[in-house]
Image: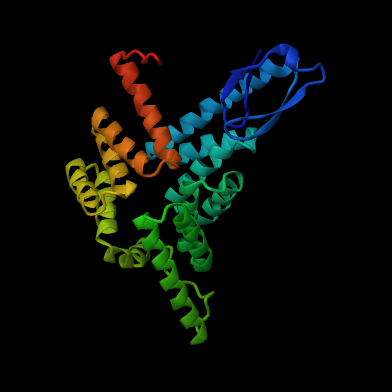
């Protein structure tokens, strides 16, 4: 009998005789989500899991295509149907962050790391959201958690330095009698640029940010130059390789994109977004060129 986890969508077969008439509890080996299975309801559970998985996949694709509103709608639908669908929270939080809805991003990303405490992508984005909300001590704590897992992450190191500096500045302002509750221009585009300026002291980060700007503007040649320079300066950082992968993907240079993503994953094997992107591209390339799967020895 086939069953499917309603949490992450992974499916498998289990002998029907191993499921008693009253049902049994099963823990998913992939996402560790517990769910209950009865013989007569197994097919319905599998169908629900398949539907949620399709909605989730569509939401992630829309997010990568920068269609944030529709992605938010899809991922919220997944969570409404199954509040324990762990991966939906990480990408929903990322989508909220792209829309600069920082309160919603914080709430959602906190939920994501509740399910997966070592989810580095969600932790990074949570730290950025805390920075934008001027919750510097919380941002500092989150960035330190990331660096304990990946101490060579230059971007997070720079963001931690920013959180420390901004926290010290806020403390000095409170001591000088300025209320930290006074409204500031922190939510404007101009002030966000100013708050990011200290990061540019790190040349690698400067090229990464420059590459991201060129990529968003569809100036792919300049984006490649920026990411290549970032890789030259910091060959052991996965961020530059990931940027190259995104740029080659936009140019539909699938072989080069896969190679760049593979290098990024080699440098940071725990990066789930890189894993998912690489899996999607490989599947797409097989369909496009009719490649047969390799036989296992």
Rendering coords of residue 104 (x, y %): 55, 52
Rendering coords of residue 51 (x, y %): 57, 23
Left of 162 or right of it: where is 117? Answer: right
Left of 110 or right of it: where is 150? Answer: left
- Name, please, the residue furthest toward the bottom: 176
Q: Is residue 155 above or below residue 240?
A: below
- Name, please, the residue furthest toward the right: 22
Rendering coords of residue 53 (x, y %): 54, 27
Residue ID at (33%, 46%): 238
Q: Nearer the viewer, residue 236 or 210?
A: 236
Residue ID at (37%, 55%): 152
How are the colours assigned in the image? rainbow
Q: Is residue 167 above or below residue 209?
A: below
* Number of marks present in the image shown: 0
Q: Nearer the viewer, residue 17 or 134?
A: 17
Left of 256 or right of it: where is 148? Answer: right
Rendering coords of residue 278 (x, y %): 37, 32
Q: Nearer the viewer, residue 169 or 101?
A: 169
Q: Is residue 90 above or below residue 74?
A: below
Q: Quadrant of residue 206?
A: bottom left
Residue ID at (29%, 43%): 241
Q: Quadrant of residue 207?
A: bottom left
Q: Quadrant of the C terminus?
A: top left
**Residue 274 appears in the figure:** yes
**Residue 133 appears in the figure:** no
Residue ID at (82%, 20%): 22
- Name, please, the residue furthest toward the front: 297
Q: Quadrant of the N terminus?
A: top right
């Amino acid at each position: 009998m086939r069953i499917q986890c309603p949490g992450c969508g992974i499916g498998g077969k289990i002998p029907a005789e191993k499921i008693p008439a009253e049902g049994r509890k099963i823990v998913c080996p992939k996402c560790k989500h517990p769910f209950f299975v009865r013989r007569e309801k197994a097919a319905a559970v599998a169908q629900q899991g398949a539907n949620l998985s399709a909605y989730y996949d569509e939401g992630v694709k829309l997010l990568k295509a920068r269609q944030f509103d529709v992605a938010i709608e899809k991922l919220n639908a997944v969570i409404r149907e199954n509040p324990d669908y762990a991966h939906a929270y990480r990408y929903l939080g990322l989508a909220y962050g792209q829309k600069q809805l920082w309160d919603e991003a914080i709430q959602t990303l906190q939920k994501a790391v509740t399910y997966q405490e070592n989810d580095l992508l969600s932790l990074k984005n949570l730290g950025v959201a805390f920075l934008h909300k001027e919750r510097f001590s919380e941002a500092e704590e989150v960035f330190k958690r990331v660096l304990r897992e990946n101490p060579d992450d230059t971007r997070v190191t720079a963001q931690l330095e920013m959180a420390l500096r901004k926290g010290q500045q806020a403390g000095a302002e409170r001591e000088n009698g300025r209320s930290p509750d006074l409204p500031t221009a922190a939510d404007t585009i101009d002030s966000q640029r100013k708050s990011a300026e200290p990061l540019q002291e790190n040349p690698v980060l400067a090229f990464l940010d420059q590459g991201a700007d060129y990529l968003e503007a569809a100036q792919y040649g300049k984006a490649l130059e920026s990411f290549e320079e970032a890789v030259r300066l910091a060959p052991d950082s996965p961020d530059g390789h990931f940027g190259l992968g995104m740029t080659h993907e936009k140019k539909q240079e699938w072989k080069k994109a896969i190679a760049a993503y593979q290098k990024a994953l080699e440098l940071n094997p725990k990066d789930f977004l890189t894993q998912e992107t690489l899996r999607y591209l490989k599947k797409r390339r097989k369909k496009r060129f009719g490649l047969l799967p390799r036989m296992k020895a």
